[in-house]
């Protein structure tokens, strides 16, 4: 097997017994976020240049939707809430997919490479220099915050009680939307 690819499997929380195992490889780069999320009865993963939905109970593939460009060398980032938000770091792209696999929107987003979170009313994309808030219905930028004195690596933003927090380069930030 590839050293930078891992296996996706489901285990029983009570005893750790293997419930199912996916035959496809998923990103497994040490220290990097991976494109895997659970919502309702589905497991979503971004792998091999596609967004894939698996049945959480069986591991069977429900649908596969091709993503623009090549598979990300650092792994595509995803987040779920009433749909699936995807950030493709290598392509500096953001997209939104319905739980059915239908793409609602996709767009370029300069500096989008460090993660994505979904709040009640926005898709938050961590950038090299801060944060962008996108409308989940249209993908339009609601606002953008460039706070890092030295742009660089960041982490997926955390959404807590109507506020979003993150790290961009040398800066820790918090934003409360009114």
Image (cartoon, helix red, strand yellow):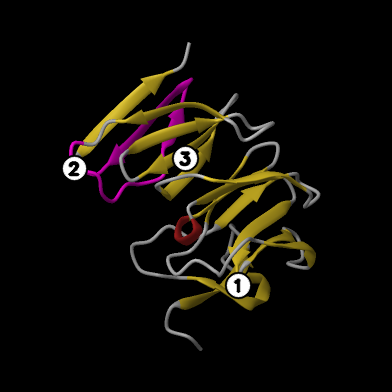
User: What SS does tag 2 mark?
Assistant: loop
Q: Quadrant of residue 120?
A: top right
> How far apart are labels 3 and 1 at the CA level?
22 Å
Between residues 57 and 93, which one lies in front from this camera angle? 93
Q: Circle 3 is placed at which residue position?
A: 125
Residue 112 placement (x, y as % from top left): 44, 47
Residues shaded magenta: 149-169
Asked whether the residues under the numbered discs 1 and 2 touch, taking CB atoms below 8 Å apart as contact, a structural biologist would say no
> How far apart are labels 2 and 3 at the CA level?
18 Å
Is 121 magenta? The answer is no
Q: Earlier in the sequence, mark 2 or mark 3?
A: 3
Q: Earlier in the sequence, mark 1 or mark 2?
A: 1
Residue 99 placement (x, y as % from top left): 76, 46
Residue 144 placement (x, y as % from top left): 42, 29
Q: Quadrant of residue 156?
A: top left
Asked whether the residues under the numbered discs 2 and 3 touch, taking CB atoms below 8 Å apart as contact, a structural biologist would say no
Q: Quadrant of residue 148?
A: top left
Residue 60 placement (x, y as % from top left): 78, 68
Mark 1 residue crowding within 10 angstroms, few (<14) / some (14–19) / many (20+): some
Between residues 133 and 82, which one lies in front from this camera angle? 133
Q: Which mark is residue 48?
A: 1
Image position of 176 with respect to 171: above or below: above
Q: Circle 2 is placed at which residue position?
A: 150
Image position of 51 with respect to 87: above or below: below
């Amino acid at each position: 097997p590839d050293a930078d690819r891992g296996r996706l499997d489901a285990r029983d929380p009570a005893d750790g017994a293997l419930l199912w195992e996916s035959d496809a490889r998923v990103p497994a780069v040490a220290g990097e976020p991976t494109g895997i999320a659970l919502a309702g009865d589905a497991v979503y993963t971004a792998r091999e240049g596609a967004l894939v939905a698996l049945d959480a109970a069986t591991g069977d593939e429900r649908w596969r939707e091709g993503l623009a460009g090549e598979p990300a060398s650092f792994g595509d980032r995803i987040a779920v809430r009433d749909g699936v938000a995807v950030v493709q770091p290598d392509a500096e792209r953001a997209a939104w997919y319905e739980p059915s696999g239908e793409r609602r929107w996709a767009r370029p987003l300069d500096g989008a490479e460090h993660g994505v979170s979904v709040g009640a009313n926005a898709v938050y994309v961590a950038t090299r220099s801060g944060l962008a808030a996108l409308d989940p219905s249209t993908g339009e930028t609601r606002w953008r915050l460039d706070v890092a004195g030295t742009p660089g690596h960041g982490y997926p933003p955390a959404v807590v009680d109507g506020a979003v927090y993150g790290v961009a380069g040398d800066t820790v930030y918090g934003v409360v939307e009114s």
